[in-house]
Amino acid sequence: MADSLAAAQGEENEPEKEGKERRMEGGSESRGSKETSEVTETLGFYDKKKAQKDKKRSLSDLSLARFMGAELTRGYFLEHNEAKYTERRERVYTCLRIPKELEKLMLFGFFLCLDAFLYVFTLLPLRVLLALVHLLTLPCCGLSGSPLLQPAQVCDVLKGVIVVLCYVMMSYVDYSMMYHLIRGQSVIKLYIIYNMLEVADRLFSSFGQDILDALYWTATEPKEKKRAHIGVVPHFLMAVLYVFLHAILIMVQATTLNVAFNSHNKSLLTIMMSNNFVEIKGSVFKKFEKNNLFQMSNSDIKERFTNYVLLLIVCLRNMEQFSWNPDHLWVLFPDVVMVIASEVTVDVVKHAFITKFNDITADVYWEYRASLAFDLVSSRQKNAYTDYSDSVSRRMGFIPLPLALLLIRVVTSSVKIQGSLSFMCVLLFYLGMISLKVLNSIVLLGTSCVFVKEANMEEKLFQSPPSAASSRSNSRAHRPTHTTPPGEPIVEDGVVSSASVTCQPTNHQQESPASTLPTSQSDDHFLTTPDGEDGDKDISAATGEEGEGLKHRNPAPKKDLLEIDRFTICGNRID
């Protein structure tokens, strides 16, 4: 009983004790908060005083002399961003190397065009003469069952007949009437006409090589019936019409340039030369890959060579009007230099900024020279399936027939041949042209062999050309994407530019199905850029598990510079 009472009193006293403790704690907390608030106020007071003192001191330190001293002694460290500045310096070095490397390519391409151009004047007439002699002496030989002419001879005869017919048609065109008709137009109208002529020339060149190749193949393809030879006639008429119209177009272009040379204030010539700088605006700020730049470089080579021939025609016409007075040549010399200098300047500036904006090194122009050299060396082999002039036409868009026809027309109308001495001079001049052609060909062939050897492209020279039955779609499907068995040789399809049909392929062995999927294991990987096509993806799915295993080990297929379609170069079309 006593225990229960004591326990009840203890329970009653416990809440009272807890209340007292809480009150004591509350009092201590209130006192602590008051003390901390007082300390905070004291510190804040001192901080404000310190800030005011610092503010007064900083205001007193602000002076023009102190500011100038800080600006003059301020330093920074470029090595903290070394990669950025190193890249900027390399871009400057690349821009400085572009003129030298570009002019090397232009010089090599100029002599390639000159070789194809001289071929029309020197070796083509001799080849046509030999073909006609062979055709006339064939009945005496009694070779029954053999074709009358070889495919290459047929193409040569067709070229010769086209040149003769177009020259006869060009003789009815009055150059003087055309000159005075163009001279009577206003300056702005002539400027527009000249621009239209440049565009038309590119379009004609782009379609012209197709017309000529179609004629050559139609005339030389195997035919079962004799009636099939009638199909050559429309192709031949189309080729004659094309060469004639293209020659007229270039004549109008040369006449417009001649009018600009003979204008009194030279305003038309200045406007025409300033038109070249518009080309910089249209090409510099576009994205370019190596293949696109290769196409543009070939187009620039062709354009520069054509301008040189046009300047030669203008000089010949002007010298004829002044009775071949040598003093008048010095009058034309400044204008000729201005035209050439503007062309070179525009090309250098354009290529320098294109390589700068697209991070392309200057060494790419050496690769382009190696690719052009490969075309030349491959066209000299026994198994070549294209003529060299056709190879240059397809690669650069340069078709020598219309330009050569116009030059023959201008020379024959400007130079009068009378007497035996004149014929002797013509004969000596012709022999000199043959000597120049042979010398140029020898030097070009030797230089090209050096370029091909340095580029490690000798293996491609010994590969057999694709069969005549292979179509364009098959050539795309058979591009190198996979490896061949170890015991089989590596064969690549389409390493040379699209084949011309100046001669038929002879007795090529049928390739096995395994060899239609070769690998690209040559050492000239620098000639490729990562531009794949959709046609390359279809082959990888058809090879099964082996192809999937090899796909991880081999890089993606790349588009070789030697496989670029040349027919779009003339229009300067960038895909």
Image (spheres, rainbow, N blue to C red):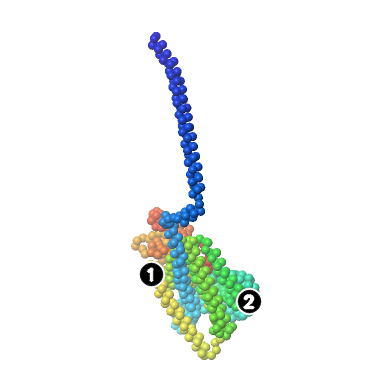
Closest to the observer, 210 or 90: 90
In the picture, the quarter occupied by the N terminus is top left
Identified at 45% across, 20% down, the residue is: 20
Identified at 47% across, 69% down, the residue is: 99
The 10 Å Cα crowd at callout 2, few under 14, some 14 to 19, many 20 or more, is: some
Q: Residue 192 bears which disc, if any?
A: none
Residue 291 place in picture, x, y as percent: 47, 64
Q: Amino acid at mark 2?
A: Arg
Q: Where does label 2 land, which residue? A: 183
Position of 465 with respect to 205 (left or right) is left
* Label 1 residue SS: helix
Residue 531 place in picture, x, y as percent: 46, 60
Q: Where does label 1 land, which residue? A: 453
The 10 Å Cα crowd at callout 1, few under 14, some 14 to 19, many 20 or more, is: some
Residue farthest to the left, as pictured: 487
Identified at 51% across, 53% down, the residue is: 64
Residue 319 place in picture, x, y as percent: 56, 82
Q: Are the residues tagged 1 and 2 within 8 Å (C-beta)?
A: no
Number of marks:
2
Residue 15 picture quarter: top left
Closest to the observer, 564 or 287: 287
Residue 28 place in picture, x, y as percent: 45, 26
Identified at 55% across, 89% down, the residue is: 418
Residue 368 can be seen, yes or no: no
* First reached walking from the N terminus: tag 1 or tag 2: 2
